[in-house]
Amino acid sequence: MGVQLLQSQGSISGVGCGVGVPPASDASYCSSDLAGSISGNLVKFDFQSTAEIPGRYLADLVASDDGTRMAGRFGVGSSIENKLWFAWLPVNGDDYWLSVPDNAPSYGGEQLALRLSTAEANDPRFDPNIVYDLGFALNGIVGDLGAFFLSEMKRDGTGSVEVGPVAATVPELPVYLLLTKTGDAFTSVTARLSNGHTFTFDVLPRL
């Protein structure tokens, strides 16, 4: 999905599309009733969509200081509590969608289950008793550690994947990830927050 946002002081208006990015001519399931607010780096908006998952689309985001990305919760319905993390990136000109690098590798749809193994002292951001999810999607990574697009990722000769560093948005979301691969399997994930605190997760065996 994509949006075109117009700001007037603390208010936002614009167009939201379930498929594609306005004003591209082939964007679809679009609605011009997008409305929201902006206060500092906090951005909220919603719009109606009749896409594959119809309903009121809601976004509660934090914009980076440099304007290169927004991230936060996104959902459909009346609440975004406990919804997935999403990232929003600017589209070039009148493009239909984000540009995928020509040399971008395919990551497949592998899903990883993570458990915290080491953490920066006195930082409670992640709980060692919780299993966190992180998965490869069609055009990036999404899960409990945030969402990242292909243009923010690279893979080395061993198959390990480095993500970022990206501009800081939500304080509790990592700005950098390293997914370490040993042989044919990912074995650990290192995450670094914008405050510099680093966390390492073990990848749990697949059942």
Image (cartoon, helix red, strand yellow):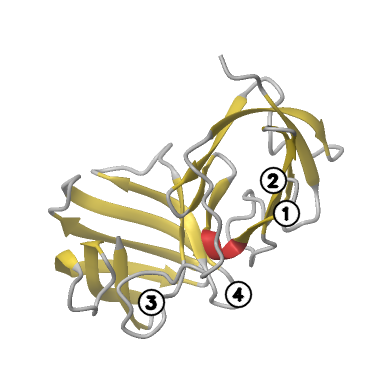
The residues bearing labels 4 and 1 have C-alpha atoms spaced at a distance of: 29 Å
Could you tell whether 10 is left or right of 145 in the image? left
Is mark 1 in CB contact (under 8 Å) with mark 2?
Answer: yes
User: Residue at the location (38% across, 76% down)?
Assistant: 10
Q: Earlier in the sequence, mark 4 or mark 2?
A: 4
What label sits on residue 10 in the rendered view? 3
Dot 4: within a 10 Å radius of its alpha carbon, few (fewer than 14), some, or many (20 or more) residues?
Answer: few
- Mark 1, residue position: 156
Element type at mark 3: loop
Task: Please state which amino acid type lies under the numbered disc 4.
Answer: Asp
The residues bearing labels 4 and 2 have C-alpha atoms spaced at a distance of: 32 Å
- Mark 2, residue position: 159
Element type at mark 2: loop
Is mark 4 in CB contact (under 8 Å) with mark 3?
Answer: no
Q: Nearer the viewer, residue 166 or 39?
A: 166
- Mark 4, residue position: 65
Q: Nearer the viewer, residue 18 or 204?
A: 204
Dot 1: within a 10 Å radius of its alpha carbon, few (fewer than 14), some, or many (20 or more) residues?
Answer: few
Measuring from the top left, give residue 70's x and y in whole percent: 49, 65
